[in-house]
Amino acid sequence: MRARLRSLASLELLNIPLQAFIWFGLLGLPANPANLAGFAAFSLLLLQGVAYWTAKRRQTDTGAAALPWTPFFAFALRANPVVLASAVLFTGWSAVADPGAGSFPGLGFALFAVLEHVNYFHVQLMYDNPADLRRLARHGLARSHLSRDLSRRRP
């Protein structure tokens, strides 16, 4: 379990520079306000994922009843929709005003960030192992791990 949690955190963190290299370096997408705004929203959610998997590992290591850094995650749950709505509106407006490589990737990153928020804070959307896939086939979508951790904190 420790190795899986470490792997999840490491892969989320690695994804930020890797995606930047692929999209802005290799493919040469313009690093303009729309694309950078979408990428920033995407990166923010990946960093929150890193924080969650790191906190979950710490909780597992120490045997603590409560998830470490819960106030941070509770704040992110409330703040993310505002940040993400702003990113989607800005990148969406940019895509309408100037469609193409200067705006569509940014909109895609912003929409992916919304999916990451849902995946972390509400409903698990990522199913990457046989046990998760069996549970999905039997019971459908499940509440996310972080959502369950945050509900344990509420009175």
Image: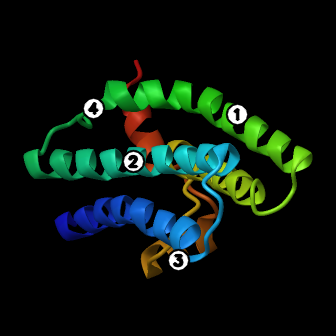
- The answer to which of marks 4 and 1 sits earlier in the sequence is 4
Label 1 SS: helix
In the image, taking residue 119 as reference, residue 51 lies left or right, namely: left
What amino acid type should be assigned to the residue bearing mark 4?
A: Trp
Which residue lies most toward the right here? 96
In the image, taking residue 109 as reference, residue 134 lies left or right, namely: left
Residue 85 — which label?
Answer: 1
Residue 122 — which label?
Answer: none
Identify the residue under disc 3. Answer: 134
Measure the alpha-carbon separation of dots 3 and 2: 28 Å
Find out whether the residues at labels 4 and 1 contact each other: C-beta distance under 8 Å: no
Query: Is 135 above or below relative to 76?
Result: below
Q: Residue at coordinates 67% horizontally, 38% vertically from top-left?
A: 87
Identify the residue under disc 4. Answer: 69
Q: Residue at coordinates 23% horizontally, 35% vertically from top-left?
A: 68
Query: Mark 3 or mark 1, which is nearer to you?
Result: 1
Front residue of 136 and 126: 126
Residue 102 x, y percent position in the rendering: 75, 56
Query: Mark 4 or mark 3, which is nearer to you?
Result: 4
